[in-house]
Image (tube, helix red, strand yellow):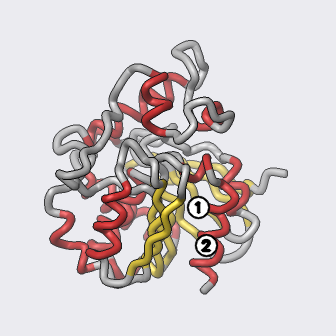
Amino acid sequence: MNSVTESKFIDVRGKRTQITIGGAGPVLLYLHSAGGEVEWTRFHEMLAQYFTVYLPAHPGFGDSRGLENIHSITDYAWHYVDLLDVLGLETVPIVGFSLGGWTGMELAILRPERISKMLLVNTAGIRIPEAPMGELFSDDIEKLKSLLFYDPNSPVIEEAMPLSFEDNRILMWLKAREATARVGWNPYLHNPRLPDHLFRIPCPVRILWGNDDQLLPVATGKFLVDALPNATLEIFEKTGHMLPYEQAERFVEEVRKFLSD
C-alpha cells in the first residue's frame, strides 16, 4: 500500500519545488540526503504510518528548479524558511539525513522557533580533522558501495542507488551529485563556522549514527552530541552511512519514539 496523498510542485520564491506528501497524523518534514531520495521509499512509507510526511526535493534535486540561485548551504536553509511559509507550517519537527541534516541544523540556527524537534541521521556539515571524511564524488560505483554501506553486497543497495551507468536512474543521480557539489565541494561537506553556532539550536535533537559510516565517521556524531545544547546520540552497530535503508525498521521506530515523547 502506498500512502502518498499528493505529489505536486509549489512555487517557493520563484523556485519550482517538487514535494510529495503522504500518510496521516502529525506533520514531519523530511530533508533528504545527497543521494536524492526524493521518490517515496520503503522507509518513507513506514514513517507515513505514524506521520504526515512532507518530502520536498532540494533545489537542483529531482524535478526541483532554482539551483542557479543556490551558492551555499545557507541558501538551502533560507529556501526551507520560505517553504514553511508557503505551506503554512508554523512549527515542525525535522528528520534530516546527511545533507538534509546539515540543512536542518542551518535552518534551526536561522529560525529556531520554527523547529520543534530535530532527528539527525549521519549528518554532514561538521569536519573533524582526526576523522577525515570519505570521498563522495568518486565515479567508481563499487567504491561508493563500500563507502556508503556496511555490507557492499546488501540487497537494499538496489533501492538506494544506481548499480551501473546503464541504470535508468543514473541521470537523476548525477544531477543530485551536481547539486551536492554546489554546496559541498569546497569546503568539502562542511561549514567551518557551523560549530560556533550550534549553541543557537535549543530544540531537542536525537542523533542516529552508523558505527561503520566510512563517509562521515561516527566521531562527528560524538562531537555533535556534546556541542548541541539538548541532544542525545544512538549508535547503530554494523551500519554504514545509509542507515535509513540498512536499518529501516529501527530507524522508523527511533523517529516514532522521539517525536511522540
Which three-letter amino acid code belongs to the residue tagged 2? Answer: Val
**Residue 72: image x %, image y %?**
23, 49
In the rendering, which numbered label is found on residue 162? none
Identified at 43% across, 35% down, the residue is: 147
Q: Quadrant of residue 259?
A: bottom right
Q: Is residue 190 left or right of residue 176?
A: left
Q: Secondary structure at mark 2?
A: strand
How far is mark 1 from mark 2, CA to CA?
A: 7 Å
Identified at 35% across, 25% down, the residue is: 138
Which three-letter amino acid code belongs to the residue tagged 1? Answer: Tyr
Q: Secondary structure at mark 1?
A: strand
Q: Is residue 154 left or right of residue 75?
A: right
Labels 1 and 2: the sequence-earlier one: 2
Q: Quadrant of residue 257?
A: bottom right
Q: Which residue is mark 2?
A: 27
Identified at 47% across, 32% down, the residue is: 146
In this rendered view, identify the residue nearer to me: 26 or 129: 129
* Residue 12 visible to the viewer: no
Q: Is residue 232 left or right of residue 27?
A: left
* Residue 76 visible to the viewer: yes
Q: Quadrant of residue 66?
A: top left
Q: Is residue 170 left or right of residue 106?
A: right
**Residue 42: image x %, image y %?**
70, 49
Q: Residues within 10 Å of mark 1 (few under 14, many from 20)?
A: many
**Residue 175: image x %, image y %?**
42, 30
In this rendered view, identify the residue nearer to me: 105 or 153: 153
The residue at the far right in this view is: 1
Q: Which residue is mark 1?
A: 54
Q: Height in image: 44 above or below 82? A: above
Q: Quadrant of the C terminus?
A: bottom right
